[in-house]
Image: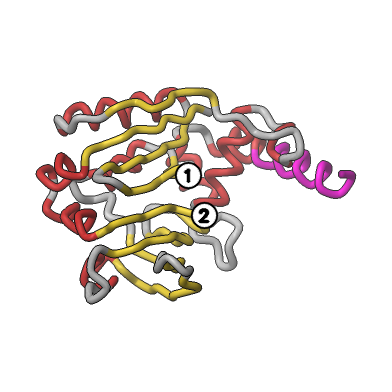
Amino acid sequence: MRRVTLQFNLEDLAERDPQEMMMRELELFELVHILKQDKDEMAMIAKLKLKDDKTKIEDLLGDQLLEYQLLETDKDGVRTYFFRAKEQSEHDDLDSLLGFGGYLIEPFSIRDGKATITFLGNSAEIKNILRAIDSYKIRYKVLSLSDAKFSYDSPLSGLTEKQRRVIVSAFNSGYYEIPRRISSEELADKLDIRAPTLVLHRRKAEQRVLEKIING
């Protein structure tokens, strides 16, 4: 798996898509943790501070927002929220980049007129994302491009790259939810591999993760 972190000027994003104008209303945005990410919706914990306290969150996100809840406010006025929002992959904007595969991960932040965005994916997915951005003619700076490392203590550390890709994609796509949001066949099609191959990688990954958790 590869990880790339990019930096954009907010003005450039706003010129590309009027929906990105909402970024201008943010003094600070910091992604804390992504709880769910698939083609239909994204759930996350994030910290933010608005330039104008009178601005409403629902006005910024419009029809993308499904649900939000204020969790806490610190002494500097930075608020921590739970957000659940629609994915907008059908539109020709930055959100559509995830249609090439891969995932949005931390660090993702907005501050001082800059947006820092990180994607995780295999080499082909990262290349497609970068090509798409280039085609949008949006200026950006590559802050880092490296292999994604998993700590020794992580249950994922003992998996092959293919096993990690399958089990992480299965989790993020809702395969383990009840009821399932995606079938093995649909997930295999999404990852562009044969269904029997996906099942084989998934079962081996599950066995190794459970073994590490139970014995570790």
Which residue is at a point 31% across and 69% down the rendered structure image? 65
Label 2 element class: strand
Which residue is at a point 29% across and 64% down the rendered structure image? 50
Q: Is residue 123 magenta?
A: no
Q: Horizontal placement of 104 versus 174: left or right?
A: left
Label 2: which residue? 33
Asked which quadrant contains residue 69, the reply is bottom left
Asked which quadrant contains residue 134, the reply is top left
**What are the residue bounds of the magenta stretch?**
202-216
Of the numbered discs 1 and 2, the one sitting upstream in the chain is 2
Inspect the image, locate mark 2, and give the three-letter code of the amino acid beneath it: His
In the foreground, 41 or 57: 57
Q: Does the magenta stretch include residue 213?
A: yes
Note whether residue 83 is visible: no
**Farthest residue in the right direction?**
215
**Labelled disc at residue 106:** 1
In the foreground, 190 or 89: 89
Q: In this view, does 19 lie above or below 121?
A: below
Q: Do callouts 1 and 2 mark residues in contact (Cβ within 8 Å)?
A: yes
